[in-house]
């Protein structure tokens, strides 16, 4: 099954059919402009198909509608659950495809990736601040993506449909999500997801309650924490404490917190859903349940710490 790419990156050359199709800057028409493509890994290389935009747009031939309707029919035919993945900082386009593929292959879910230009280049601190600014400017593009998911996938499911729609936002992708939720444009759009996983979030731990609580209409919101996270320790140098490597005290009532800090073989791993899942079956099982819309805390190797109000993963 191909991965659906939704991106506000620039198009390098519309005739390209590999990962070189999209670049590392925002779309030439602005950061709110999105383009769609199908991506499939075959024969040791990526094959991409850019969805063309007709000269005269109508409701009937609108590419976004046709593509998302095709995605919905594919979900209904395969019976697979679906995950929207939002990546983090300093990711070239190919890397975003590889991470989406890892989710697709390991957890056997249909995957849609929202790929934003998080690798603008330059000195690392300046690049990080520029990526934050791009994330802020990507909220309209992200809103359009969720609206398409809602209108042409979630609302198009028959009443008896059991397919689950979930979202995982990784690292600085949570900064993009935070800005989206705090923007007046937000009106509870995240309610279309069964589970939302705020994965190793590169956002301020002190203020996360203010925006996480706004996702109260989603069935479940999960927060992952690894105090030894080797990537977020660098973010700590220029930022306040990060949510993804700091256990909140006291934790908020709305999300469910998972502490992976003492889990076997996890150490400094940042990508728990990928690298962590390869070395720890408890971690793999947790993310499998979360990304299939189930209750993630009900599984092996997960114990509730009443004193701290969170679940510890072993």
Image (cartoon, rainbow, N blue to C red):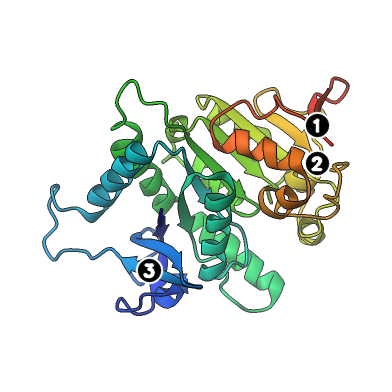
Image-quadrant location for residue 294: top right
State the CA–CA distance, disc 1 to disc 3.
39 Å
Residue at 30 percent across and 37 percent down: it is 151
Frontmost residue, 178 versus 225: 225
Could you say whether the residue bearing mark 1 is in a helix, strand or loop? loop
Could you say whether the residue bearing mark 3 is in a helix, strand or loop? strand
Could you say whether the residue bearing mark 2 is in a helix, strand or loop? loop
Image location (x, y in percent) of residue 120: 56, 73
State the CA–CA distance, disc 3 to disc 2.
36 Å
Q: Is residue 178 visible?
A: no
Mark with earlier residue (1, 3): 3
* Labels 1, 2: front one: 1
Q: Residues within 10 Å of mark 3 (few under 14, many from 20)?
A: many
Q: What residue sits right under mark 1 in the picture?
A: 301
Image location (x, y in percent) of residue 40: 42, 63
Q: What residue sits right under mark 3 in the picture?
A: 48
Instruction: Tell me, yes or no, whether the two marked residues, 3 and 2, touch with CB atoms within 8 Å.
Output: no
Q: Is residue 180 above or below residue 303?
A: below
Instruction: Tell me, yes or no, whether the two marked residues, 1 and 2, touch with CB atoms within 8 Å.
Output: no
Q: Is residue 249 above or below residue 231?
A: above
Q: Residues within 10 Å of mark 1 (few under 14, many from 20)?
A: some
Image-quadrant location for residue 220: top right
Q: Which corner quadrant holds the C terminus?
A: top right
Image-quadrant location for residue 216: top right
Mark with earlier residue (1, 2): 2
Image location (x, y in percent) of residue 2: 40, 56
Q: What residue sits right under mark 2 in the picture?
A: 260
Frontmost residue, 264 versus 219: 264
Q: Is residue 141 left or right of residue 211?
A: left
Q: Is residue 140 above or below residue 284?
A: below
Instruction: Tell me, yes or no, whether the two marked residues, 1 and 3, touch with CB atoms within 8 Å.
Output: no
Mark with earlier residue (3, 2): 3
């Amino acid at each position: 099954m191909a991965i659906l790419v939704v991106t506000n990156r620039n198009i390098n050359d519309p005739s390209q059919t590999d990962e070189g199709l999209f670049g590392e800057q925002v779309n030439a028409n602005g950061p709110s402009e999105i383009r769609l493509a199908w991506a499939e890994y075959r024969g040791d290389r990526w094959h991409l198909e850019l969805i063309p935009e007709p000269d005269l747009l109508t409701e009937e031939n609108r590419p976004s509608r046709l593509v998302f309707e095709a995605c919905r029919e594919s979900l209904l035919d395969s019976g697979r659950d679906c995950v929207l993945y939002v990546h983090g900082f300093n990711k070239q386009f190919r890397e975003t495809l590889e991470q989406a593929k890892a989710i697709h292959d390991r957890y056997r879910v249909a995957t849609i990736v929202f790929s934003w230009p998080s690798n603008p280049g330059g000195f690392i601190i300046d690049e990080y601040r520029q990526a934050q600014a791009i994330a802020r400017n990507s909220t309209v593009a992200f809103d359009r993506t969720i609206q398409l998911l809602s209108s042409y996938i979630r609302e198009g499911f028959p009443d008896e449909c059991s397919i689950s729609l979930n979202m995982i936002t990784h690292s600085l992708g949570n900064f993009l999500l935070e800005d989206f939720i705090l923007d007046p444009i937000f009106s509870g759009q995240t309610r279309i997801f069964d589970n939302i996983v705020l994965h190793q979030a590169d956002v301020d731990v002190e203020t996360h309650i203010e925006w996480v609580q706004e996702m109260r209409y989603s069935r479940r919101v999960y927060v992952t924490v690894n105090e030894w996270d080797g990537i977020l320790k660098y973010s700590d140098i220029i930022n306040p404490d990060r949510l993804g490597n700091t256990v909140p005290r006291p934790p908020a009532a709305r999300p469910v917190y998972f502490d992976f800090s003492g889990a076997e073989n996890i150490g400094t791993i940042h990508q728990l859903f990928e690298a962590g899942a390869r070395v720890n079956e408890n971690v793999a099982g947790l993310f499998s349940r979360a990304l299939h819309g189930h209750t993630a805390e009900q599984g092996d190797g997960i114990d509730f710490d009443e004193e701290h109000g969170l679940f510890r993963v072993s």
